[in-house]
Image: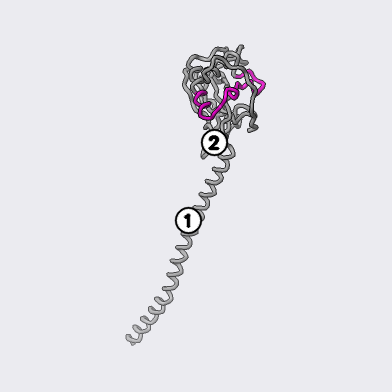
Amino acid sequence: MKSKFAETKSAWAGKLKTLSAPLGSQLHSSWRWGIRHWKLLVGGGLVAIIAVVGLISYKNSIQPEGIIIHHTGPLNAEGQPVDVEFLDSFHQERGYGSYYWGRVYHVGYHYIILPNGGVQEGRPEHLHGAHAQGFNSYLGIALVGNFSARPQRSGTPSSDPTPAQLRSLIALSKDLSRRYHIPASRILRHSDVAQTECPGQRLPYRNVVAAVYGVSSVAQQPIVSKNAK
């Protein structure tokens, strides 16, 4: 009796082993297929994200055509000196943000020049600006200060740009004009392309442009291009 039970047990064990072999093979195959499918989905998703980022960034890209000079008030509403951090926050409130290669830049200028001559970077040079409607393919350089002939409406008195600011403006403009082949006719004031006093009559514009190109003087030349970005 015991021997017959042992034989029956052995027979069932053999059948179970026979049945489990293909089942295990199928489960292993399904698991491997699932892993491959998951990797394909993840890889495809990453490719799609990179493609979207690249497409948006490309759409927002420019080849700089010129330079536009601006001024800002020297102090913000809280009486603190204006700098790139303040301008970034201020322009964010105005909706100036542009996406470019993984980051949103809010400050509309490409460079900010402080009264001590320090140069702060705003948005990247190849990202379109948000500083002069119709001319945002031009690089925007803002000097901190009020260079109008009269005080601002806020009461901020007018002044001349500091010598350090002018030196930095000339050096920066010289570098940019060399790298992007910008002629003198494309270094403009904001007031040349919009109804504004910016950057003010107290900024020696023609002297700056003359110094950039190493000539004794320059005359206002006609604007040669316009980009509606």
Residue to which mark 1 is pinned: 39
Closest to the observer, 177 or 76: 177
User: Start and end of the magenta stretch?
Assistant: 172-198
| The C terminus sits in image quarter | top right
Q: Position of residue 121 (x, y in %)?
A: 49, 28
What crowding class fits label 1: few (fewer than 14 Cα within 10 Å), some (14-19), or many (20 or more)? few
Q: Give the numbered dot on residue 73.
A: none
Q: Between disc 2 and disc 1, whose residue precedes?
A: 1
Q: Residue shown at 43%/76% (left/top)?
A: 19
| The N terminus sits in image quarter | bottom left
Q: Position of residue 110 (x, y in %)?
A: 54, 28
Kind of residue at badge 2: Val
Q: Secondary structure at mark 2?
A: strand
Kind of residue at badge 1: Lys
Q: Is residue 197 magenta?
A: yes
Q: Is residue 56 visible?
A: yes
Q: Residue shown at 61%/22% (left/top)?
A: 190
* Quarter of image, res 198: top right
Q: Is residue 124 above or below residue 188?
A: below
Q: Is residue 125 magenta?
A: no
What crowding class fits label 2: few (fewer than 14 Cα within 10 Å), some (14-19), or many (20 or more)? few
